[in-house]
Image (spheres, grey):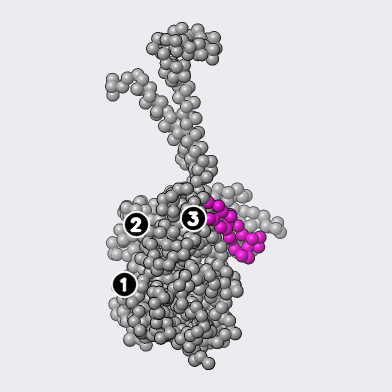
């Protein structure tokens, strides 16, 4: 090589190289990227300091005694479970001079859905029901801005066929010494949670060796919750059959969540929103539907019902075919009151809405 | 040789004494080169290194600066962008058959001080050949029957096709509109009954043809998405709406109307008064939600009869106040199902469906056929409610007179 290159030519190469290095240097400096930033990363390198949401902002650490710590266990090919937690701690003096400690914890869990059916139903309802809305860009999952769930592609399923998920939970509170008040974890809203979930899922799948060819992305706008809770009603969630007398509904309220072809939820609460009357959920999106696999029994839950299902103490679930895919209907409720008529009304109203035959006995189709 | 001597003189006069002394040692072939030739300037390795460093730093700074300017859309990159910086030269050209001599003028998007009217702004693209496109950003007015007015007339016409994928927006070859997603600017809260903030585009010319030019429609659809994306980025929102064109349905349908299927809706009998008198076709929106309109016998953009269903509660709110107007003849329905009224030229039912408010509207261009309106409304509501998953929905209208 040396012999082939004359002096002038070598000089030209030298200049070219030097310019390239300088330009590249200026570029990384201008865009604030490695090695000029010195920013911390969290959750297996998926989230970077100052990348958007407040809890990752370096400004949060400007307060007194403020610290951000993290703990993480990455999934591996051999061990398909992982967990990471980011903790924020800061102290401030309140207006009356007492000391207030702010604690925030954001936890990400990588792994399969819980195995036990009762536990799993509660887990599904917790992430997909109430005020959660579907993730954008067709990602199978949901978030309400404080927590979120994303079901990973089939390639990450466990050996017994259960889907692997990434969940995100947050806890934020202000500790006044004698009392604690919950506060905002600084996740930056639903859109931001969708991005955090996609980023951490991509990194975890790389570690676990099941990453798809194209990384998951959450770019499109996140749908927003259509309405607030409603405390003056006789028909809950505008669903025929979920009727309450004016007297019965006096201290109750309902919350309509997502209402799409893939996901629908309706929560009815007692005690001015503090107690559960029931949480009703419909799931038809195929990957979310897979979360129910193995928990919906092998025969009809009761006489006259279509499909298969289970009526347990704390939940009722039924799965029936609808427009070529399984439609799962779940109701979480304590069995103090007999809720089957409400479950039947919800199941049939939802099935009819999406254009399918009734699931519960006594329903009529279009 | 003369030339080279002259150059040498110039060289000497410009350089200091040290340099002029060394110029005597410059080889002949080097002397022929002008003094600023890099071979002459970079005579030694040290000088070369210094030059390299300086040139490199300058180049880096220039490129870096240009990059920043490009990102910030400043400097020479700013002048080319139209409509608040949302549309590049190519985007504008795409709207005018590739012509690049389009003039733009604009009023920035601002809100009044208390925000009661929502944000508003306007941008106009004008071709020297007379074509022009007006872009408006505004919040749809739900007051004073503003919804029944011109905006719905034009922008919810059957010639427009939904942008699809859950987007609240539509496009034709002469009109396009798209609501700014709630996730970005926040959804109007329960007590606030204001309409969505939209960006809409209209081309100045009237089209007498019912057929829609798909190429022009796609260009408008892409442009309106770019405008909304740019607006969202300005508001600090990180999400971005993808190109809607691949998922959009074809242009509107012209159903072959049978006597018992007005607008292609089975079981909806066509009243004798509305049998085509040679004035025009029947045009029906294609594609799923948020709006399905059937315009019959359109003349100068005005249908003789319009049947319209608005599925998206964010848009159906436009008709909420009107539906509660008790002064007109009320429609009888289960109070839990919704409200509505009929009058001589229109019937309206605002239903409470599982998805939220849904508007069913029947409107004639005049009040000449009041009994037909009363016949059509309940049947239209029943059929459409079934189609969109809000059935069974039965309402009763008292006969006319």
Residue B49 drawn above or below residue B257: above
Give a yes or no on whether discs 1 and 3 share a subunit: no
Q: Give the class, few, some or many, for how many residues have Cα within 10 Å of label 1's Cα (few <14, many ≥20).
A: few
Q: Position of residue A173 (x, y in %)?
A: 57, 61
Disc number at residue A80?
2
Q: Give the image quarter of residue A167.
A: bottom left
Q: Give the class, few, some or many, for how many residues have Cα within 10 Å of label 2's Cα (few <14, many ≥20).
A: many
Left or right relative to A103: residue A366: left
Disc number at residue A105?
none
- Report the quarter where the N terminus of chain B lies: top left
Which residue was labeled with disc 1? A325
In which chain is the residue bearing label 1? Answer: A
Upstream in sequence: badge 2 or badge 1 = 2
Q: Position of residue A205 (x, y in %)?
A: 36, 54
**In this rendering, does residue B281 appear at all?**
yes
Q: Residue, x 54% and y 60% (percent of image)?
A: B136
- Using the image as rendered, state which of residue A221 and residue A107 is in the foreground: A221
């Amino acid at each position: 090589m040396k012999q082939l290159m004359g002096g002038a030519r070598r000089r030209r190469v030298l200049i070219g190289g030097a310019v390239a290095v300088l330009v590249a240097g200026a570029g990384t400096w201008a865009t604030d990227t490695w090695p000029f930033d010195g920013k911390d990363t969290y959750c297996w390198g998926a989230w970077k300091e100052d990348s958007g949401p407040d809890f990752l902002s370096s400004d949060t650490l400007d307060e007194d005694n403020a610290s951000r710590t993290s703990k993480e266990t990455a999934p591996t090919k051999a061990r398909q479970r992982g967990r990471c937690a980011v903790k924020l701690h800061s102290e401030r003096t309140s207006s009356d001079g007492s000391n207030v400690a702010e604690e925030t914890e954001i936890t990400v869990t990588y792994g399969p859905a819980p195995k036990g059916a009762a536990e799993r139903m509660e887990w599904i309802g917790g992430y997909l029901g109430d005020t959660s809305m579907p993730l954008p860009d067709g990602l199978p999952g949901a978030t309400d801005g404080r927590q979120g769930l994303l079901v990973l592609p089939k390639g990450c399923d466990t050996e017994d066929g259960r889907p692997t998920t990434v969940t995100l939970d947050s806890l934020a509170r202000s500790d006044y010494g004698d009392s604690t008040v919950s506060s905002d974890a600084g996740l930056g809203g639903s859109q931001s949670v969708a991005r955090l979930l996609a980023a951490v899922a991509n990194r975890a799948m790389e570690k676990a060796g099941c990453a798809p060819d194209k990384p998951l992305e959450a770019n499109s706008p996140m749908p927003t919750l259509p309405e607030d809770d409603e405390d003056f009603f006789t028909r809950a969630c505008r669903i025929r059959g979920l009727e309450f007398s004016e007297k019965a509904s006096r201290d109750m309220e309902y919350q309509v969540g997502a209402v799409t072809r893939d996901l629908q939820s309706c929560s009815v609460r007692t005690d001015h929103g503090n107690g559960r009357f029931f949480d009703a959920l419909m799931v038809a999106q195929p990957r979310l539907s897979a979360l129910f696999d193995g928990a919906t029994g092998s025969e009809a839950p009761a006489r006259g019902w279509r499909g298969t299902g289970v009526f347990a103490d704390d939940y009722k679930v039924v799965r029936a075919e609808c427009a070529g895919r399984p439609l799962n209907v779940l109701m979480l409720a304590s069995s103090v009151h007999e809720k089957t008529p409400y479950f039947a009304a919800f199941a049939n109203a939802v099935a009819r809405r999406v254009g399918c035959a009734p699931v519960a006995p006594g329903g009529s189709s279009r | 040789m003369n030339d080279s001597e002259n150059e040498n003189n110039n060289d000497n006069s410009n350089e200091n004494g040290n340099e002029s002394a060394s110029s005597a040692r410059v080889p002949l072939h080097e002397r022929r080169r002008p003094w600023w030739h890099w071979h002459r300037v970079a005579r030694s390795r040290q000088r070369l290194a210094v030059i390299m460093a300086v040139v490199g730093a300058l180049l880096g700074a220039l490129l870096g600066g240009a990059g920043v300017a490009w990102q910030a859309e400043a400097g020479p990159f700013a002048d080319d962008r139209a409509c608040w910086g949302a549309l590049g030269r190519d985007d504008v050209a795409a709207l005018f058959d590739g012509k690049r001599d389009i003039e733009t003028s604009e009023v920035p998007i601002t809100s009044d001080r208390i925000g009661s009217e929502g944000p508003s702004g306007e941008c106009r693209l004008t071709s020297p050949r007379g074509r022009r496109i007006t872009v408006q950003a505004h919040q749809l007015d739900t007051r004073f029957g503003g919804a029944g007015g011109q905006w719905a007339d034009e922008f919810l016409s059957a010639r427009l096709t939904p942008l699809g994928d859950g987007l609240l927006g539509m496009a034709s070859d002469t009109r396009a509109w798209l609501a700014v997603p709630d996730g970005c600017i926040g959804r109007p809260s329960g007590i606030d009954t204001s309409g969505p903030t939209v960006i809409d585009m209209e081309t100045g010319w009237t089209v007498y043809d019912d057929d829609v030019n798909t190429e022009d429609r796609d260009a408008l659809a892409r442009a309106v998405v770019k405008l909304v994306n740019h607006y969202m980025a300005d508001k600090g929102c990180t999400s971005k709406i993808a190109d809607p064109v691949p998922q959009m349905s074809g242009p509107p349908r012209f159903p072959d109307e049978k006597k018992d299927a007005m607008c292609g809706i089975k079981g909806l009998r066509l009243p004798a008064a509305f049998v085509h008198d040679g004035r025009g076709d029947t045009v029906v929106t294609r594609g799923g939600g948020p709006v399905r309109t059937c315009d019959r016998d359109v003349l100068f953009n005005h249908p003789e009869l319009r049947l319209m269903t608005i599925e998206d509660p964010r848009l159906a709110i436009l008709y909420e106040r009107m539906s509660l107007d008790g002064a007109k003849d009320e429609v009888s329905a289960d109070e839990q199902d919704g409200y509505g009224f009929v009058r001589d030229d229109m019937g309206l039912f605002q239903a409470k469906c599982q998805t939220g408010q849904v508007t069913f509207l029947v409107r004639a261009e005049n009040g000449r056929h009041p009994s037909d309106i009363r016949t059509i409304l309940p049947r239209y509501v029943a059929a459409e409610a079934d189609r969109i998953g809000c059935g069974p929905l039965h309402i009763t209208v008292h006969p006319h007179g």
